[in-house]
Image (tube, rainbow, N blue to C red):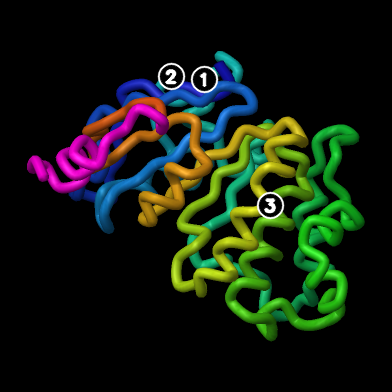
Amino acid sequence: MLLSVQGLTAQYGQFKALFGIDLHVAAGECVAIIGANGAGKTTLMRSITGVLRNAPEMIRHNEDPIGALPADLILQRGIAMVPEGRKLFPSLTVEENLRIGGQVRRGTGRWSLDEIYSLFPILKDRRHSPGTALSGGQQQMVAIGRALMSNPELLLCDEISLGLAPVVIRDIYAALPAIRASGAAVVIVEQDIARALSVADRVYCLMEGRVTLQAPAKDLTREAIHAAYFGATA
């Protein structure tokens, strides 16, 4: 299994955010994680990427325990994240932001500057502009491109549609087939349930730090999602 999470707990000081999360992602798969604000989605991503440290065996990558590894070693293993809020380096140009992602490259994978510019042509036109001078959607493209430059085998996307116009969201999600075609598995953390279901193979729903639903996306009903999301039937 590419990624397996077993009995994951996480807390900030005395506040416990995750309660025994079980989750897995197979190679090449697209998994969506849905849930309301405060459900624990971002905490889960921070745990997987080593920003929050855990017991080693709670998170495994290719069967190796990685729960206690720091973020830089997680990235070197091929797990990259597109963080909520994009978090570009404001003093750097678009191209410089992208090149930073390539500093931890894994072998000779598909992704290079030319491939990123092919995926998001507007970035080539704006490559000498400061990253923060771009629109929100273009900044999101830079954040995705920066993560891809490390040639990850698992790409984690935390709320990539948040605050963006529908036409921009459509363009960003249109890039997912090419990303998956490169061999990368993708985890989408998303509040837009319909958008998540449209691209995912499987879906997990979190509520108050617990998994309340896991199922193939094609099998989910509106009633089941409502019950998992809000803790009540429709």
Task: Name the amino acid type tagged 2.
Answer: Glu
What residue lies at 59% left-to-right and 48% top-to-bottom?
81
Would you say 141 lies left or right of 216 here?
Answer: right
Q: Marks 2 and 1, Cα distance to the nearest angstrom?
A: 5 Å
Part of the protein shown in magenta: 217-234
The amino acid at mark 1 is: Pro
Crowding at mark 2 (Cα within 10 Å: few <14, some 14-19, many 20+): some
Q: Residue at x 79, y 72 (%)?
A: 122
Can I make out residue 109 in this image? yes
What's the magenta bit mostly, secondary-structure-wise?
Answer: helix
Report the residue that reaches farthest toward the bottom: 133
Whether residue 60 is in magenta: the answer is: no
Q: Are marks 2 and 1 in contact (CB under 8 Å)?
A: yes
Q: Residue 177: which disc?
A: none
Residue 55 in view (yes/no): no
Q: Which residue is mark 1?
A: 65
Q: Earlier in the sequence, mark 3 or mark 2?
A: 2
Q: Tell me the tag on residue 57.
A: 2
Residue 170 in picture, x, y percent from top left: 58, 61
**Judging from the image, what secondary structure is the residue with disc 1 in?**
strand
Left/right placement of residue 192 relative to residue 38 reads: right
User: Which kind of residue does numbered mark 3 sit on?
Assistant: Ala
Q: Secondary structure at mark 2?
A: helix
* Left or right, residue 27 beside residue 151: left
Of labels 3 and 2, the one closer to you: 3
11 lies left or right of 125: left
Asked whether 220 falls inside the magenta stretch, the response is: yes
Residue 172 is drawn in which quadrant?
bottom right
The residue singled out by tag 3 in the image is: 175
Callout 3 environment at 10 Å: few (<14), some (14 to 19), or many (20+)? some
Q: Position of residue 95 (x, y in %)?
A: 83, 68
